Image (tube, grey):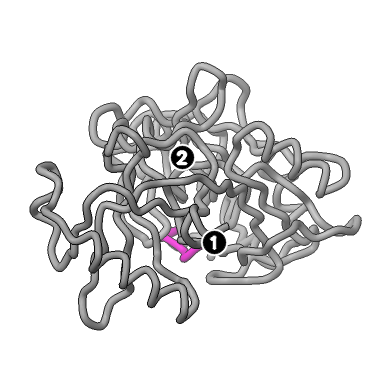
């Protein structure tokens, strides 16, 4: 592609697995809790930042654009995760969501791969070699930082990440080529936890997945929704309880469509992504908390 203008390339997407892969041919990194971002540099005056789906969010990432301008490259495509960190230095997804709309200088990029550099397509080079090239162009104390690999046993790494409340880890085959789309050559292991929440209602639209709307026990504060992926018997018991506890909608949620509301009292066990979020994420129902 030497001489051709670089454009967005759909990213490589890791497969979700229950446990990280073992062996010396894998690289393990912290899974940063943010927005996937691709920085496309054609010149200091022509830098774009794209989302995972290819949307141009350059104006939302001014700080990252300015950091990219300082890199000593003619052109490049850098893959990474845009994050906002909290006082402990950990990614804060809630703060990121606010910053995207209010502060284009709040984000930093955790850079973990490079697809092109100075007219050379690097996608057929192995992952470890690409990362070494990327490391060589990153400047210290910049809003673009290199995502370091974590040495050691992957199960021990994941245990420490889980205990720290971090989203998880991403494992990559050291010699894997960069290929757009889902792949098992990259694997992500997420850190989940199980908590009890109170059911507010069930959102059901024909032809769509059903969701349970959930509240914090005791306060009734809405905390988000969870996929209803229960077995047939458990689903039937859930629908029965919804009918038995039918009630009016909470004032703050009246506008939710196609929802059957319930009165307080139905408590559920929910598996969701660990982390300090205003709303639970990637949540699914496990069952009733009083049927253990």
Residue stretch in magenta: 6-11
Q: Nearer the viewer, residue 222 or 135?
A: 222
Q: Would you place residue 81 above or below residue 219 in this image?
A: below
Label 1 and label 2: CA atoms lie apart by 28 Å
**How packed is label 1: few (under 14 Cα within 10 Å), some, or many (20 or more)?**
few
Q: Which mark is residue 31?
A: none
Q: Would you place residue 22 above or below residue 207 in this image?
A: above
Q: Nearer the viewer, residue 247 or 25?
A: 247
Residue at 87% across, 46% down: 153
Point out the image quarter for the C terminus: bottom right
Q: Is residue 285 rendered to the left or right of residue 262?
A: right
Q: Nearer the viewer, residue 96 or 82?
A: 96
Q: Position of residue 102 (x, y in %)?
A: 24, 29
Q: Examine the structure image and report whether residue 10 is included in the region drawn in magenta.
A: yes
**How packed is label 2: few (under 14 Cα within 10 Å), some, or many (20 or more)?**
many
Q: Is residue 193 visible?
A: yes
Residue of label 1: 2
Helix, strand or loop for disc 2: strand
Q: Position of residue 111 (x, y in %)?
A: 58, 41
Residue at 35% across, 44% down: 46
Image quarter of residue 47: top left
Main SS of residues in magenta: loop
Q: Examine the structure image and report whether residue 135 is included in the region drawn in magenta.
A: no
Residue of label 2: 82
Residue at 29% across, 55% down: 213
Helix, strand or loop for disc 1: loop
Q: Earlier in the sequence, mark 1 or mark 2?
A: 1
Q: Nearer the viewer, mark 1 or mark 2?
A: 2
Q: Nearer the viewer, residue 259 or 47?
A: 259
Q: Position of residue 132 (x, y in %)?
A: 75, 44
Outermost residue toward the top in this view: 87
């Amino acid at each position: 592609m030497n001489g051709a203008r670089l454009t967005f390339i759909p990213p490589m997407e890791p497969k979700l697995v229950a446990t990280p892969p073992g062996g010396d041919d894998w690289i393990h990194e912290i899974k940063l809790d943010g927005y996937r971002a691709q920085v496309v540099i054609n010149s200091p005056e022509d830098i774009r930042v794209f989302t995972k789906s290819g949307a141009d969010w350059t104006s939302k990432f001014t700080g990252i654009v300015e950091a990219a301008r300082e890199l000593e490259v003619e052109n490049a495509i850098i893959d990474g995760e845009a994050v906002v960190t909290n006082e402990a230095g950990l990614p804060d997804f809630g703060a990121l969501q606010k910053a995207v709309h209010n502060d284009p200088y709040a984000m930093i990029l955790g850079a973990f791969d490079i697809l092109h550099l100075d007219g050379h397509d690097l996608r057929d080079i192995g992952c470890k070699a690409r990362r070494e090239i990327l490391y060589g162009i990153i400047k210290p104390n910049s809003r673009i930082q290199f995502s370091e690999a974590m040495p050691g046993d992957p199960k021990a790494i994941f245990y420490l990440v889980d205990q720290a409340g971090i989203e998880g880890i991403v494992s990559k085959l050291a010699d894997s080529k960069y290929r757009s789309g889902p792949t098992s050559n990259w694997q992500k292991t997420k850190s989940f936890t199980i908590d009890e929440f109170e059911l507010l209602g069930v959102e059901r639209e024909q032809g769509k997945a059903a969701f349970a709307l959930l509240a914090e026990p005791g306060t009734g504060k809405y905390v988000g929704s969870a996929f209803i992926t229960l077995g047939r018997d458990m689903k039937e018991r859930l629908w029965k309880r919804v009918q038995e506890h039918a009630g009016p909608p909470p004032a703050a949620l009246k506008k939710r469509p196609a929802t059957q509301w319930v009165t307080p009292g139905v408590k559920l066990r929910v598996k969701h992504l660990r982390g300090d979020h205003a709303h639970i994420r990637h949540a699914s129902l496990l069952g009733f908390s009083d049927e253990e």
